[in-house]
Image: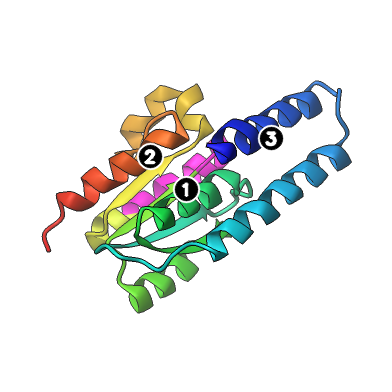
Amino acid sequence: MVCLEVLQKGLAHIGELWFYNKATVQQEHFASALAMRRLNTLVTAAPPPNRPGKIIVACPADEHHVFAPLFLTLMLRYKGWETIYLGANVPREYLETTIASTKPDLIVMTAQQLHSAASLFEEAEFLRQEGISLAYGGRIFSLTPALRGRIAGHFLGEQLDTAVPTIANILSKRPS
């Protein structure tokens, strides 16, 4: 709850202030770095996995906004799933290598901007051809809902707190 109501909303607010030139880039970067350190600490302290399913969480190539996927990683870990957080700007060749070595049950990717949604589109097509499930979300899919129908995968919804139940539903429908 603190992450949703304080960290996420606080970062959104300072991002808006920066956009309207009411906060400096240094203030925005300081707040973001502080929030990320807190999230990383919580992820590190998460209990070990206790339910089936391995999930990779990453951003497609050219996506550098990592608060949402890191926060989602935290929520998934506290719900008992093994998660592998890859972070920002993950090109396909690196994703392919990680998939080959970890054999995940689901890939979760987030895109915040149109150019990174284009990268996600390409990743989704690759994953579809490989028979690997993809779930995705991000601000651009809330701002431009028509994009949702173009990505081969499961849209996680417009709110970060609804993503975990959607992921649970996706994983429950996979064959064991």
Give the distance between the C-alpha atoms of the residues marked 2 and 3, in whole angstroms: 19 Å
Asked whether disc 1 touches disc 2, contact meaning CB atoms under 8 Å apart, the reply is: yes
Q: Is residue 172 left or right of residue 150?
A: left
For numbered disc 2, what is the local secondary structure? helix
Q: Which residue is mark 2?
A: 163
Q: Amino acid at mark 3?
A: Leu
Q: Badge 1: few (under 14), some or many (20 or more) residues near its Cα, within 10 Å?
A: many
For numbered disc 1, what is the local secondary structure? helix
Instruction: First in sequence, mark 2 or 3: give its number.
Output: 3
The percent position of residue 42, horizontal first and vertical second, equals 57, 57
Q: Amino acid at mark 1?
A: Leu
Quadrant position of residue 169: top left
Give the distance between the C-alpha atoms of the residues marked 3 and 1, in whole angstroms: 15 Å
- Seen from the viewer's position, the closer of residues 38 and 103 is 38
Q: Which residues are magenta?
A: 111-125
Q: Which residue is mark 1?
A: 72
Q: Which mark is residue 11?
A: 3
Image vertical order of residue 47 relative to residue 5, above or below: below
